[in-house]
Image: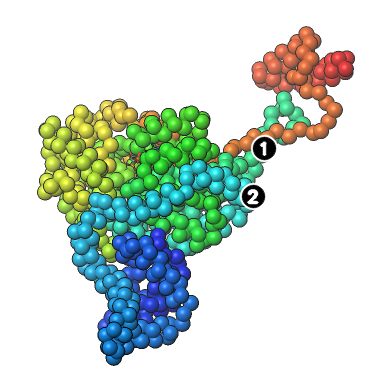
């Protein structure tokens, strides 16, 4: 076995040890030669779940047992066993049959994995999967079903209880101790990024580069942010204590809330899992994580968490649909971190309101890009095309409408069309495709509806008219002649659309951009820095990139979130990390005999002194300051006297 290669893979059915056993068996059956790589030199073991999925659970358990044995058996003994199985050729049939079946079974497993993997590289494997109904539109139906039935054995109440029980263990760790898990996870993801990318691609249909750039890089960047900033952000903070509270001091403690329920969408399943999970954990919380039923990445998060040494219950992954999510809210977590659609969040907020559970919401958007005529048009065109098409347009901060100044509209349109014509689309294996396809059938239907609506209202399609309205590989749809009343201009499409709209002046474009129920992100393109700044301030959104696109998310020191129906609260950055905390205010005084001036008993004299002191303190100036000091001292002594008299 090639050293260091794939000792672990992420399987929902087999443990790391069983995978190790399977790799040993694989190398005994296919040791490799000059023309063929050995079994473990390939990455095909990673497809094991596809095969195990279709086995009876008894057979799977038996196989698992055998693999456990192989994991501790020296490879020469496994080779001996494999060759012994061949003795059926020399035995009479009635004696040889058991050996023949064993031979067939063991080699069958290995050859199936090896050759289906090879075929996959050529794209045949994917086609076979499609014919058996495991196609791009329902990439995870089967695995999810199984994972959900495993889930059902544990009730939501047990999950909630476990999360609460272990939360004290996490809280007791220092931030530095929690960060050790973060560092380990970072290294693990770096070393297994290609395997993780394949898992992401399987569930989402996205291009390999999209998975690398937006999911893997983004996650690693956030983990690096936590490593460098969390200790500072979460340590006790001393704040000023005003003169009226002389002699006291004030502090803020950033403490854990308890249990965080994270509910995620399907568009960035790895990023939307790891970023909030690790931020919530570093802030000292236990986590219940419910991925989208469409992109569960079944087994992956648990596998990573257990391999970095997270204890049982610290991060629990619960598979299922909205009903499962709702049953988890019933367990009254200390906070819900939700990323998803406006329609869903209305139900979630209603349910959360029953128990006053705080919510942090990252919702949809209809993000505008505003291109002024003085911008570098080549750069702006490349930027907005990327912003509109990255992840096949399935990003909350996708560029969904592009306002182009009328004086450069035609030139900009031609540049955009040229770039769009060169876009390469496929679910590739080498990183050479620009975009992949759509993840869910429901979203394909929304894109189709928006397309039909735009065409019916007079829009022109400059690219993508070859799309049949159903295929998940929707080509880039470039729209011209768009009006504000079209769905593509004001509702979230969440697909590969490039929607061009004309504007004439700054005032007009700001008001059209703001005329939306959403307020997530925007981008502004112009050579005039003052104008960029003016427009950025005037836009009703949570994030603005100037002469760039979707880049505020690229800096994990910046908080991220929306206004209006795009969200509540912020995540990422120091603000985001602290949003998983109970921000506790502490005021410290000495253990003296002194009675505070504002405590009982109230007297007429105290009232007059307090009133004069208030006037002096808030009027300002040096004479008033002296007056404040005198009145304050008199008030202090009046307070002590009145207290002593009332004893
Ligand atoms: P969705 O709202 O349909 O589902 C999101 C999650 O909520 C899923 O896990 C789903 O199972 C769960 N859910 C559904 N009903 C529930 C209920 N009653 N109780 C508890 N959980 C429930 O969203 P989606 O289609 O998966 O994702 C697409 C949406 O997410 C888009 O609107 C997109 O803009 C938004 N999004 C926002 C951000 C952001 O950071 N602002 C990031 C990514 C996606």
- Which residue is most to the top? 604
Nearest the camera: 523 or 181? 181
Q: Where residue 443 sits in the image (x, y, percent)?
A: 25, 43
Q: Residues within 10 Å of mark 1 (few under 14, many from 20)?
A: some
**Could you tell me which residue is drawn at 24 percent across and 54 percent down?**
136
**Could you tell me which residue is drawn at 44 percent across and 31 percent down?**
351
Q: Quadrant of residue 487?
A: top left
Q: Ligand 1, what quadrant?
A: top left
Q: Where residue 368 sits in the image (x, y, percent)?
A: 29, 37
In this rendering, the label closer to the viewer, 2 or 1: 2
Indicate the quadrant containing the N terminus: top left, top right, bottom left or bottom right.
bottom left
> Is the C-beta separation of discs 2 and 1 under 8 Å?
no
Pointer 2 residue: 172
Q: Where residue 636 sits in the image (x, y, percent)?
A: 81, 20
What's the CA distance linking mark 2 and mark 1?
20 Å
**Could you tell me which residue is drawn at 77 percent across and 13 percent down?**
602
- Tell me the element at label 1: strand
Pointer 1 residue: 251
User: Is residue 571 in view?
Assistant: no
Q: On the rendered structure, is 233 left or right of 246?
A: left
Q: Quadrant of residue 428?
A: bottom left
Q: Is mark 2 within 8 Å of ligand 1?
A: no
Indicate the quadrant containing the C terminus: top left, top right, bottom left or bottom right.
top right
Nearest the camera: 187 or 519? 187
Q: On the rendered structure, is 306 left or right of 90?
A: right
Q: Is residue 607 above or below residue 546?
A: above
Q: Earlier in the sequence, mark 2 or mark 1?
A: 2
Q: On the rendered structure, is 333 left or right of 592?
A: left
- Which residue is most to the front? 94
């Amino acid at each position: 076995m090639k050293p260091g290669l794939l000792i672990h893979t992420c399987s929902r059915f087999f443990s790391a040890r069983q995978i190790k056993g399977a790799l040993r068996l694989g190398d005994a059956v296919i040791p490799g030669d000059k023309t063929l790589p050995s079994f473990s030199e390939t990455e095909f073991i990673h497809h094991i779940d596809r095969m195990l999925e279709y086995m009876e659970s008894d057979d799977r358990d038996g196989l698992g047992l055998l693999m456990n044995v192989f994991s501790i058996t020296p490879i020469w003994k496994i080779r001996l066993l494999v060759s012994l199985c061949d003795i059926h050729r020399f035995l009479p049939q009635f004696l040889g049959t058991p050996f023949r079946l064993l031979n067939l079974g063991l080699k069958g497993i290995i050859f199936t994995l090896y050759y289906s993997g090879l075929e996959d590289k050529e794209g045949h494997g994917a086609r076979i999967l499609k014919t058996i109904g495991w196609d791009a539109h329902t990439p995870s139906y089967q695995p999810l079903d199984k994972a959900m039935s495993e889930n059902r054995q544990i009730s939501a109440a047990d999950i909630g209880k476990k999360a609460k029980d272990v939360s004290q263990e996490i809280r007791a760790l220092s931030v530095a101790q929690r960060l050790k898990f973060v560092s380990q996870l970072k290294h693990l993801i770096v070393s297994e990024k290609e395997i993780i990318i394949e898992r992401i691609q399987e569930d989402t249909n996205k291009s390999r580069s999209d998975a690398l750039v937006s999911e893997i890089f983004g996650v690693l960047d956030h983990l690096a942010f936590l490593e460098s900033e969390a200790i500072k952000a979460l340590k006790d903070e001393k704040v000023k204590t005003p003169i009226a509270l002389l002699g006291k001091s004030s502090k803020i403690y950033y403490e854990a809330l308890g249990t965080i329920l994270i509910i995620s969408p399907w568009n960035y399943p790895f990023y939307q899992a790891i970023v909030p999970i690790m931020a919530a954990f570093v802030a000292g919380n236990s986590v219940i994580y419910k991925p989208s039923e469409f992109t569960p990445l079944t087994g992956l998060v648990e596998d990573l968490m257990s391999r970095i040494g997270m204890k049982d219950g610290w991060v629990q992954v619960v598979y299922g649909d909205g009903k499962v999510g709702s049953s988890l809210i019933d367990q009254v977590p200390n906070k819900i971190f939700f990323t998803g659609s406006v329609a869903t969040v209305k139900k979630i907020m209603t349910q959360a309101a029953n128990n006053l559970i705080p919510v942090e919401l990252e919702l949809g958007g209809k993000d505008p890009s505003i291109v002024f005529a003085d911008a570098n048009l080549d750069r702006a065109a490349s930027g907005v095309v990327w912003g509109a098409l990255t992840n096949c347009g399935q990003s909350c901060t996708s560029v969904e409408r592009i306002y182009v100044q009328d004086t450069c509209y035609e030139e900009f349109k031609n540049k955009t069309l040229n770039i769009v014509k060169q876009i390469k689309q496929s679910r590739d294996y080498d990183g050479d495709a620009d975009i992949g396809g759509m993840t869910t059938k429901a979203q394909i239907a929304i894109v189709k509806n928006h397309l039909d609506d735009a065409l019916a209202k007079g829009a022109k399609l400059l690219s993508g008219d070859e799309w049949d309205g159903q295929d998940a590989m929707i080509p880039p749809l470039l729209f011209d002649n768009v009006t504000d009343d079209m769905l593509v201009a004001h509702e979230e499409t969440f697909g590969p659309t490039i929607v061009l709209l004309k504007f004439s002046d700054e005032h007009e474009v700001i008001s059209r951009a703001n005329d939306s129920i959403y307020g997530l992100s925007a981008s502004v393109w112009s050579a005039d820095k003052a104008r960029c700044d003016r427009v950025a301030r005037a836009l009703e959104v949570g994030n603005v990139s100037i002469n760039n696109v979707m880049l505020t998310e690229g800096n994990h020191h910046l908080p991220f979130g929306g206004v209006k129906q795009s969200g509540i609260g912020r995540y990422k950055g120091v603000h985001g990390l602290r949003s998983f905390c109970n921000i506790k205010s502490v005021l410290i005084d000495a253990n003296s005999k002194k009675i505070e001036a504002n405590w009982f008993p109230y007297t007429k004299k105290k009232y007059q002194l307090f009133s004069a002191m208030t006037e002096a303190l808030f009027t300002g100036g040096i004479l008033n300051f002296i007056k404040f000091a005198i009145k304050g001292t008199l008030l202090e002594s009046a307070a002590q006297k009145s207290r002593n008299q009332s004893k």
